[in-house]
Amino acid sequence: MAKPPRRAKARARAPKQHRVVSHQQWLNERKRFLAKEKKFTRLRDQLNEARRALSWEQVEKPYRFDGPSGSETLADLFQGRSQLVVYHFMFPPEWEEGCKHCSFWADNFNPLGVHLNHRDTSFVAVSRAPLAKLERFKQRMGWSFKWVSSGQSDFNYDYHVAFTPQDLKSGKAYYNYGTMDPEMSDREGVSVFYQDSSGAVFHTYSTYARGIDMLNTAYHYLDLVPKGRDEKPGPPQAWLEHHDRYRD
């Protein structure tokens, strides 16, 4: 007789003992929760509309990036489209590989391109590490999204995802719209830009820290299951340190 399939090795934290009810009770409770979900969806729609209505600021500085096709300006990164999403990937020049946490986010990037492009939007990841390091790590991880180096410009500093030695020494840097200890020379974030018909470029939005949670597709699925993101006890995403895909 065939052996039953082996169960995957259990994680340290199991779901707490949970209530089990009749189908009718389950259905009644689910409908009550659905009302909350619908309210949240409408609030999210309103928040998205308010985000799009925020004022813009014009980008005056002539940033240049080192990409697979050579030196490119910020305007070049739009690739003929009017909207650009930049993921600030933590990879300072002295590192030999990218941040494990940013890598978890980046595993969601490859399939985005075709859908964003069809909606007049380009996507690019930007890091301070030299292009050669970015290309090596990109090949190792099997990624195809565009990734450029900002190492020869102030781009990461101006958008508050890179910090000076003085910032690190003092433990006081401007990040996520407030003063805090950044703890490391680079941090994560997303910035959005718009280019008008005259070629002028505008910064429309940036978000940092947990503001990028909504951009991780895997998290949205994990939020549906009983164990959730399965990240407690311990710091958020600590499990990445032991995940084969993100190890050295």
Image: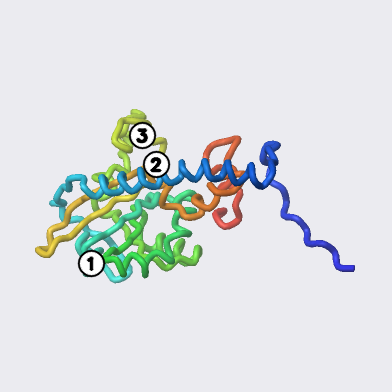
Which element carries disc 3, helix, strand or loop? helix
What residue sits right under mark 3 in the picture?
A: 168
Residue 103 visible at all: no
Classify 72 as above or below 90: below
Mark sitting on residue 81: 1
User: In the image, residue 188 lies at what x, y percent?
Assistant: 38, 46
Mark sitting on residue 209: 2
Judge left or right: residue 195 versus residue 245: left
Q: Find the residue positioned furthest to the right.
A: 1
User: In the image, residue 84 lies at what x, y percent?
Assistant: 27, 59
Badge 2, how many Cα within 10 Å: few under 14, some, many 20+? few
The answer to which of marks 3 and 2 sits earlier in the sequence is 3
Kind of residue at disc 3 = Leu
Judge by depth and name the residue closer to the eye, 51 or 12: 51
Kind of residue at disc 2 = Ala
On the rendered image, what quadrant is the C terminus found in?
A: bottom right
